[in-house]
Amino acid sequence: MEQPIVNGVACDASGATFAVIGISNMPTDWAKVFSSLANTDLTLDAAAGRSGGEPALLRAVAEAAAGGTDRGDTPAAVPPPSMSMTPPSVLNLNAYLMYALGKVARRKLTERLEARGLRLWHLTVMTLLADLGPQMKTALASRLDMNASDLVKIVNDLARIGQVDCVRDRTDRRRVVVELTAEGRTYLAGLSAEIASADDEILAPLDAAEREQLGSLLRRVHGHLERPPAGVARGRGYGTPAPRTGS
């Protein structure tokens, strides 16, 4: 039986049945090959002579499984192979876990934002204005460590859809500041609710207490790693801004 390709069923001297497949770049005596590999005499069934790719191989596997059952053999309990593509040892590396989970979180967040024609910078600017109140563009760019021209583009995008306004500072009429509009606050609330739904998807295995603990730990790590804005020293007075009170 000299063929370049073979798949089907083989039996050894004890009657055990095997699904086999072989591919060679030249005519090959597969009976000798499989006998040598198994260190025993193998008999290739007639089905082994036909070629047909994956369907034939699947038939061979099914026939082999059925053959073992018909002989009364008790199949060994074989655990199903893991479908995870992640090497188990790398799961012990927190940096890797944060990277992998961060990719998923960023994708889900991006999907929510893109559905509204926005990017992460739009959300960041709106949230900063909601937290701190009206800000000069230079101050926004400094706090966000952004190029000033890029910040102007983001502000212009938000102004065009009515989420922010550029107005004279009430305390210093010489200055122009960016402020969140009433529509912008409503819009941001709806957007935040959509993002919260992404949190629910990602953190589904955790209960409320575990989510709170995780959030607390992540905020501590974020505070440790976050760089202060240019010209602002890290220390007292720098960190997460306190919630605003009043208008």
Image (cartoon, rainbow, N blue to C red):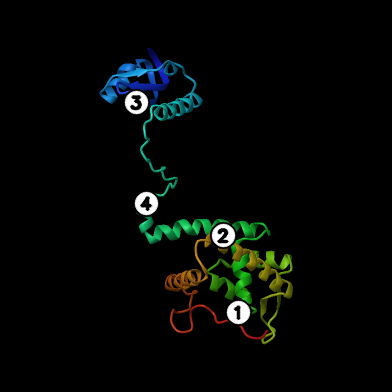
CB atoms of marks 4 and 3 within 8 Å: no
For label 1, the SS is helix
> Are the two marked residues, 3 and 2, in contact with CB atoms closer than 8 angstroms?
no
Q: Amino acid at mark 3?
A: Ala
113 left or right, relative to 204: right
Instruction: Count up the numbered dots.
Output: 4
Which residue in the protein does label 2 denote? 201
Q: Residue at horizontal 44%, vertical 28%?
A: 66
Task: Tell me the SS state at disc 3.
Answer: loop
Instruction: Please state, as top left, top right, bottom left or bottom right, where the N terminus lies in the image.
Output: top left
Mark earlier in primary sequence (3, 1): 3
Alpha carbons under labels 2 and 4: distance apart: 23 Å
Please tell me which of labels 2 and 1 falls first in the chain.
Answer: 1
Judge the density around disc 2: few (<14), some (14-19), many (≥20) Cα neighbours within 10 Å: few
| Crowd band around label 4 with a 10 angstrom C-alpha radius: few (<14), some (14–19), many (20+) | few
Residue to which mark 1 is pinned: 132
In this image, 42 relative to 96: left or right?
A: left
Checking the image for residue 16, the label placed there is 3
Q: CA distance from mark 2 to mark 1?
A: 29 Å
